């Protein structure tokens, strides 16, 4: 199992992970497609497959709300990322395009793991949820930068929810599995934030501040909608909405400093 090996590392930022020597691919705050390609290829090749038992038993009051939340995440993780790939093609950086392909593959692996987890919980994946369609619609509104800013909101909320599951579920296999997913998500945040930092280099401080407030307003609305929609799972995990919001907003603040401010 990967998760238990990294269990004490999920509070760290990716830069701190670099400093521990766990990962050696990155220079501080600098986006390099080559370094990220090396990271994604290394992550793909070195990772042990996550094995889940055919059956996972959860307490009755937690099982249904957790299933409902995982079904929504599973559908979000399994997208093909066609628009993101198309936009990545406009950067004229074929190495970045390869990174995006591998990034999407990692998300699809998460979908596959969540699909197996749902099966072990005796539940099926769903094929439609309004929140997934809303995200896809928003992401396609404008160009690559809008796509990634909105993608980052999903990454932030997702990473915080998976971490909440890793911290609060009592089932060992589920804890370890979510810990392993959180590790990937921390690097997804770093990958997309540092890429955005490079994209925003030519924007004036005033323009960045304006973009920040628009981004924050959207993040706030999405996070509140998420908390309402997933309130039963948060309650089953014994996490107050205010506690989850605090985690998400703290992660957003870090992301905003990295990507924009
Ligand atoms: Fe993911
Ligand atoms: Fe991700």
Image (cartoon, rainbow, N blue to C red):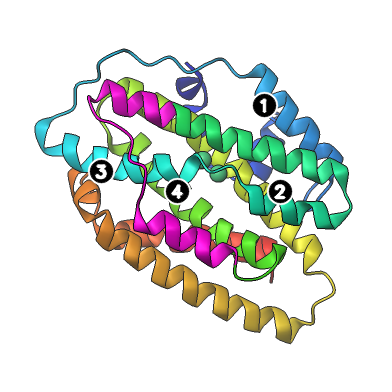
Tell me if 202 is positioned left or right of 74 in this view. right
Cα gap from disc 4 to disc 1, whole angstroms: 20 Å
Give the mark nearest the N terminus, 2 or 3: 3
Q: Residue at x 84, y 56 (%)?
A: 91
**Can residue 142 be seen by looking at this rendering?**
yes
The stretch drawn in magenta includes residue 123 = yes
Give the mark nearest the N terminus, 2 or 4: 2
Mark 3: few/some/many CA within 10 Å (<14, 14-19, 20+): some
What label does residue 68 carry, if any?
3
Q: Is residue 76 above or below residue 178?
A: below
Within 8 Å of ligand 2, the CB of disc 1? no
Tell me the residue that label 4 is attached to: 158
Q: Residue furthest right?
A: 92
Tell me the residue that label 2 is attached to: 85
Q: Is residue 49 above or below residue 242?
A: above
Towards the viewer: 121 or 85: 85
Mark 2: few/some/many CA within 10 Å (<14, 14-19, 20+): some
Say what secondary structure mark 3 lies in: helix
Q: Are marks 4 and 3 in contact (CB under 8 Å)?
A: no
- The mark lying in front, picked from 4 and 3, is 3
Cα gap from disc 3 to disc 1, whole angstroms: 29 Å
Q: Residue at x 79, y 44 (%)?
A: 97
Q: Quadrant of the C terminus?
A: bottom right
The percent position of residue 87, horizontal first and vertical second, equals: 74, 57
Q: Which residues are the magenta region?
A: 113-140
Say what secondary structure mark 1 lies in: helix
Cα gap from disc 2 to disc 4, whole angstroms: 21 Å
**Can residue 25 be seen by looking at this rendering?**
no
Give the mark nearest the N terminus, 4 or 1: 1
Tell me the residue that label 1 is attached to: 43
The percent position of residue 54, horizontal first and vertical second, equals: 30, 13
């Amino acid at each position: 199992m990967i998760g238990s090996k990294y269990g004490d590392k999920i509070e760290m930022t990716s830069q701190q992970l670099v400093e521990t020597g766990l990962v050696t691919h990155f220079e501080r705050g600098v986006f390099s497609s080559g370094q990220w390609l090396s990271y994604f290829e290394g992550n793909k090749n070195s990772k042990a497959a996550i094995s889940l038992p055919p059956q996972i038993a959860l307490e009755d009051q937690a099982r249904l709300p957790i299933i409902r939340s995982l079904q929504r995440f599973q559908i979000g993780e399994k997208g093909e990322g066609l628009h993101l790939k198309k936009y990545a093609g406009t950067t004229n950086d074929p190495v970045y395009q390869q990174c995006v392909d591998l990034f999407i593959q990692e998300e699809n692996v998460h979908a596959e793991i969540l699909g197996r987890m749902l099966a072990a919980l005796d539940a099926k994946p769903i094929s439609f949820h309004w929140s997934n369609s809303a995200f896809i619609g928003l992401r396609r509104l404008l160009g690559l930068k809008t796509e990634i800013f909105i993608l980052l909101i999903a990454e932030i909320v997702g990473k915080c929810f998976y971490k909440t599951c890793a911290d609060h579920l009592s089932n060992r296999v589920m804890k370890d599995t979510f810990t392993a997913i959180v590790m990937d998500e921390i690097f997804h945040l770093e990958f997309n934030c540092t890429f955005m930092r490079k994209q925003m280099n030519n924007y004036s401080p005033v323009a960045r501040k304006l973009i920040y407030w628009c981004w924050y307003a959207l993040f706030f609305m999405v996070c509140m909608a998420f908390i309402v929609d997933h309130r039963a799972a948060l309650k089953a995990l014994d996490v107050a909405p205010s506690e989850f919001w605090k985690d998400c907003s703290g992660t957003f603040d870090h992301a905003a400093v990295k990507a924009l401010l």
